[in-house]
């Protein structure tokens, strides 16, 4: 479940503001306004705000607790330094938890979601655990139960009720399959299997190459690898009408593949001014470009997005640039984020 921090004004003071977290004015009536989901604040800065605590003490606002009950005493708020449950993070969803559950990343929702743990391996096979392969001594003739339907199925008049006779007969009949499988049972005797050109090693699998099944080492999953991020929470301002670089992410030398690139920034503009933001890959490819105006002067609003791109094997630069639409109007950005990881 995502964290929330909802306020309701009482009307004893309007408008009301909290200068220690921003200059936004909140005009009565406001009912259950989520300062995290709707206004883009972080939970820690809301819990640390003395102006919010003073507004609660003076009866100007109430804050809802986790069950939706109003908090009218600031001492009932959790401390900003107090640890929070895993489920309080905005990108974590925990549902119907049971013992030994795990959380796994879900790309479609960009969240970590709870699920049952993978099943445990079998306890024992031939008194061994893990990837068990039958070896000499695991079976004996008493465990072979085979009797032909008629005595005529045999090459001679041996007693079909005796296991040793049955095994002798089965061994003799193996010769009928010489064209398919050798007497030692090697898989390499199949016409479309080649384990001779390149002998298999422990852990390899057979893979079809278009003409034969050959031993190869299975490839590991790549989703989520090559992760890298860059961020800057400080404010950056400009009146330039040409783009100015405000955040850069330089990857390590990464392999070729498909990559998920994500960005986030908060912006504000002077009255009648617009803020322009663009995301560029290697200073040549524009992944995203927007021009926005904040609803009121100095009020911060959010721009976010992502792109899935195919990258070559190399070191790559991802830049976040911004500019003002008017040289006499200031555009300001803060809390800038860039992230990348491989998806294929």
Image (cartoon, rainbow, N blue to C red):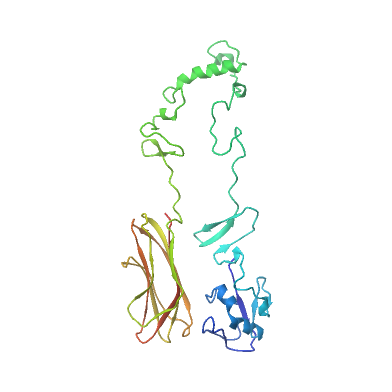
Q: Is residue 60 above or below residue 32?
A: below
Query: Looking at the image, can residue 44 be seen?
Result: yes
Number of numbered callouts drawn: 0
* Residue farthest toward the front in the current orientation of the protein: 81
Q: Is residue 38 above or below residue 169?
A: below
Quadrant where the C terminus lies? bottom left
- Please give left or right for residue 105 compared with residue 282 in the image: right
Residue at 59%, 89% (x, y): give it: 14
Q: Position of residue 188 (x, y in %)?
A: 41, 29
- Please give left or right for residue 257 compared with residue 60 in the image: left
What is the quadrant of residue 237 in the picture? bottom left
What is the quadrant of residue 16 in the picture? bottom right
Q: Position of residue 58 (x, y in %)?
A: 65, 86
Foreground of the two, 291 or 66 = 66
Residue at 46%, 37% (x, y): give it: 202
Q: Is residue 54 above or below residue 122?
A: below
Foreground of the two, 132 or 207 = 132
Q: Position of residue 4 (x, y in %)?
A: 59, 72
- Please give left or right for residue 10 compared with residue 155 in the image: right
What is the quadrant of residue 122 in the picture? top right
Quadrant where the N terminus lies? bottom right
Query: Looking at the image, can residue 32 be seen?
Result: no
Q: Is residue 60 above or below residue 100?
A: below
Residue at 62%, 65% (x, y): give it: 85
* Residue farthest toward the top in the current orientation of the protein: 157
Q: Position of residue 273 (x, y in %)?
A: 40, 84
């Amino acid at each position: 479940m995502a964290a929330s921090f909802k306020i309701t004004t009482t009307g004893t003071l309007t408008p009301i503001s909290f200068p220690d977290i921003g200059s936004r004015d909140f005009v009565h009536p406001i009912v259950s306004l989520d300062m995290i989901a709707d206004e883009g604040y972080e939970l820690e800065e809301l819990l640390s705000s003395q102006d919010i605590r003073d507004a609660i003490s003076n009866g100007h606002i109430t804050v809802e607790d986790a069950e939706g009950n109003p908090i009218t005493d600031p001492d009932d708020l959790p401390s900003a330094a107090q640890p929070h449950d895993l489920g309080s993070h905005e990108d974590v969803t925990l549902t119907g938890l049971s013992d030994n559950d795990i959380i796994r990343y879900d790309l479609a929702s960009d969240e970590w979601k709870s699920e049952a743990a993978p099943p445990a391996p079998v306890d024992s096979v031939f008194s061994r655990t893990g990837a068990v392969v039958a070896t000499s001594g695991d079976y004996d003739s008493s465990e072979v139960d085979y009797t032909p339907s008629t005595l005529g199925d045999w090459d001679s008049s041996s007693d079909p009720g005796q296991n040793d006779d049955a095994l002798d007969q089965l061994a003799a009949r193996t010769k009928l399959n010489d064209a398919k499988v050798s007497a030692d049972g090697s898989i390499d005797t199949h016409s479309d299997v080649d384990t001779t050109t390149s002998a298999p090693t422990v852990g390899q699998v057979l893979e079809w190459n278009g003409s034969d099944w050959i031993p190869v080492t299975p490839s590991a999953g790549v989703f989520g690898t090559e992760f890298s991020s860059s961020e800057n929470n400080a404010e950056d301002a400009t009146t330039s009408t040409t783009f100015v670089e405000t955040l850069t992410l330089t990857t390590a030398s990464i392999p070729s593949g498909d990559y998920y690139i994500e960005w986030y920034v908060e912006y504000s503009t002077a009255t009648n001014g617009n803020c322009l933001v663009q995301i560029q890959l290697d200073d040549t490819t524009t992944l995203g470009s927007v021009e926005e105006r904040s609803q009121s002067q100095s009020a911060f609003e959010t721009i976010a997005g992502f792109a899935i791109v195919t990258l070559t094997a190399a070191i790559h630069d991802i830049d976040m640039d911004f500019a003002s639409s008017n040289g006499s109007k200031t555009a300001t950005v803060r809390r800038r984020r860039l992230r990348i990881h491989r998806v294929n």
